[in-house]
Image (tube, rainbow, N blue to C red):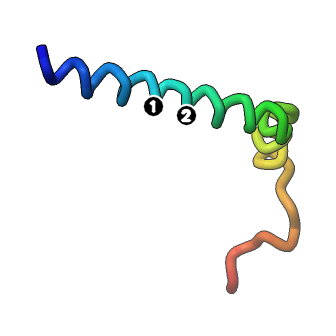
Amino acid sequence: MNYLVLLVPIALGMGAIGLVAFLWSLKAGQYEDLDGAAERVLHADTTDRPLP
């Protein structure tokens, strides 16, 4: 039971760090344009050709 005294605060701390990181990413706008990168793959650029 003594190991729970150490593991429970560690688990709660890791959960709090994850929550803070998620909230920071929301505030930074990481989830605003989810389709942009997927659509950029479909539009081929003429400058992105393999070398002859």
- Amino acid type shown at disc 2: Ile
Label number found at residue 35: none
Q: Residue 41 versus residue 31: which sits nearer the camera? A: 31
Q: CA gap, disc 1 to disc 2?
A: 5 Å
> What residue do we see at 76% from left, 39% from top?
38
Hey, which quadrant is residue 45 in on the image? Answer: bottom right
**Element at label 1:** helix
> What residue do we see at 79% from left, 31% from top?
26
Q: Is residue 25 left or right of residue 18?
A: right
Where residue 14 appears, as percent x and y from the top left, is 45, 31
Q: Is residue 32 left or right of residue 20?
A: right
- Amino acid type shown at disc 1: Met
Please rate how many residues cluster around mark 2, counting C-alpha atoms within 10 Å: few if below 14, some from 14 to 19, many from 20: few
Q: Residue 51 versus residue 19: which sits nearer the camera? A: 19
Label number found at residue 17: 2
**Element at label 2:** helix
| Residue furthest out toward the bottom | 52
Q: Is residue 24 left or right of residue 4?
A: right
Q: Residue 20 versus residue 49: which sits nearer the camera? A: 20
Residue designated by label 1: 14
Q: Are marks 1 and 2 in contact (CB under 8 Å)?
A: yes
Where residue 19 appears, as percent x and y from the top left, is 61, 26
Where residue 13 appears, as percent x and y from the top left, is 46, 29
The C terminus: image quadrant: bottom right
The N terminus: image quadrant: top left
Where residue 51 appears, as percent x and y from the top left, is 69, 83
> What residue do we see at 78% from left, 39% from top?
30
Total marks shown come to 2
